[in-house]
Amino acid sequence: MGTQPGQGALSAVSARPAAPREPDWPTRVYRFADKTLMIVELEIWKLRRDPTELVTRAVQPMLWLLLFGEVFSHIRAIPTGNLPYLDFMAPGILAQSVLFVAIFYGISAIWERDLGVIHKLLVTPTPRPALILGKALSAGVRGLSQAVIIYVLALVLGVRINWSPLAIGGVLVLVLIGAALFSTFSLIIATIVKTRERFMGIGQVLTMPLFFASNAIYPISIMPGWLQAISRVNPLSYEVDGMRALMLSGGTSAFGLSIDFAVLIVITGVLVALAGRLYPHLVT
Amino acid sequence: MSILETRDLTRSFGSVVAADRVNMTVEAGETFGLLGPNGAGKTTVIKMLTTLLPPTSGTASVAGFDVKSQADRVRRVIGYVPQLISVDGELTGFENLRVFARLYDVPRAEQRDRIEEALDLMGLVDVGSRLVRQYSGGMIRRLEIAEAMLHRPPLLFLDEPTVGLDPIARDTVWERIDQLRTDYGTTILLTTHYMDEAEQLCGRVAIMHVGRIATIGTPRELEASLNQPGATLDDVFEHYAGGQIETGGTYGDTARTRRTLRRLG
């Protein structure tokens, strides 16, 4: 190749037939959705092959409901209005178990980076947010299995569940969004710390405050003022609030259901966009 | 006709210049080798050419598209096999290919045929429904090449394609790469630090040293340029890249490479 200006362009034209045309936007939307779902499907194939994880994950919420729940409902230490304490707590434990599934999700990104999987994904013509959303919804799939387990447990323990299909559907949507939100948050941390050891440290540090500075196992109203403020900016509180309104017969929302959904969806959207920006830095 | 061209392609990490004003042109249909010791900057160059890493300065075009401003276009016309393992051990070979057929927008109706064709080309038809965890190192590499070929890219990047493989597995990988070139006329850019691999596969090679291209040409030309009778490509490599204390490869890199090698078994 010489330095004449026309020559590079000429070779470019002749090499171009291999490249497809720029797709129109319905095609792009379809492809975005198709690729997002591909990532989710992949996760489902794997879970179907090895469901051990789903079983072991069921243990923790079971212990919370059986031990903590039973004890605290007998001593009646926490004012929960017209709800029995176990009823009050069940949606909180659902939200908690979804949080625990999601908050360590970023470690898989670090694992994939240490292999070469992320390199390969990023070289495909897949929009970065589709990769992130796919991962986020995969965490949601695991969250859904937690929901099934907790509904069964709650039924056994005599929690008065709202069986209306619409309400159950609403809870499941909240599970999906909640898992997506916290797994994307976790992914963002992974893109920043980049190593397993640092990630595990930070994950541990975050989990407890997120859980205890929320309305999961006691109402915000009994907290000291500073903790109330934190609880109100904690997305987990909105997830729990929505679940409490939808999962229980006689459950009510403190913030309003539309606020709950709006807050969760907006935060998730922002986090997915941000993670889409940061994700490619995992390979640099 | 060139399919890839770089002009003063540079990437620095802090004060370290990993790739320093790299200029090279790859012609359509040829197999081009990027040679150099560990840390010479081969992988950095490949990452820039495959859109994984934005250049600090300089430009590179692939099939006429700029790697920085037209990254999505570039991604559609290249295939990439990273140095590290990029297939999922918990899935079967067939499932791995299915994932990438969809990520590469292979039309639904064609997906199955393409996957079967790719398995056939790489000699993996019999093991397509087995979990990749049970594959040998050579089979994993061939599956990765199959995955990178599903959308029939005119240009394929292979980063250290036979690192950690035993001689027999290497021969099979080489054979399949040959087959690929015959069947599809694919242009290949590969990195290696095995001179026999470069001799075997590459029409032209560039030798990289501390981020720069030290020399470029056909293996014969480079051997002749030394003015030593009976000089081999090893001597050329020694001449341009040898005698220098090894600079590259941090603790983390080494740990990662070893882990990959162990997995390739």
Image (cartoon, coloured by chain):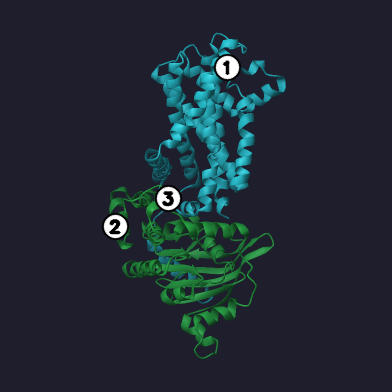
Chain colours: A cyan, B green
Eyeballing the image, is B178 above or below B134?
A: below
Q: Which disc is residue B84 wearing?
A: none
Q: Where is residue B233 in the image (x, y as percent from the top left)?
A: 50, 80
Q: Are marks 2 and 1 on the same chain?
A: no
- Secondary element at tag 1: loop
Q: Which disc is residue A254 wearing?
A: 1
Residue identifier under label 3: B88
- Secondary element at tag 2: helix
Camera-nearest residue between A46 and A272: A46
Residue identifier under label 2: B125
Where on the picture, by quarter, is residue B254? bottom right
Q: What chain does badge 3 belong to?
A: B
What is the spatial separation of the Cα atoms under label 1 and label 3, in whole angstroms? 45 Å
Q: Residue at x 28, y 49 (%)?
A: B109
Q: Residue at x 65, y 16 (%)?
A: A221
Q: Are marks 2 and 3 on the same chain?
A: yes
Eyeballing the image, is B49 above or below B208?
A: above
Nearest to N terminus: mark 2 or mark 3:
3
Camera-nearest residue between B195 and A6: B195
- Secondary element at tag 3: loop
Mark 1: few/some/many CA within 10 Å (<14, 14-19, 20+): some
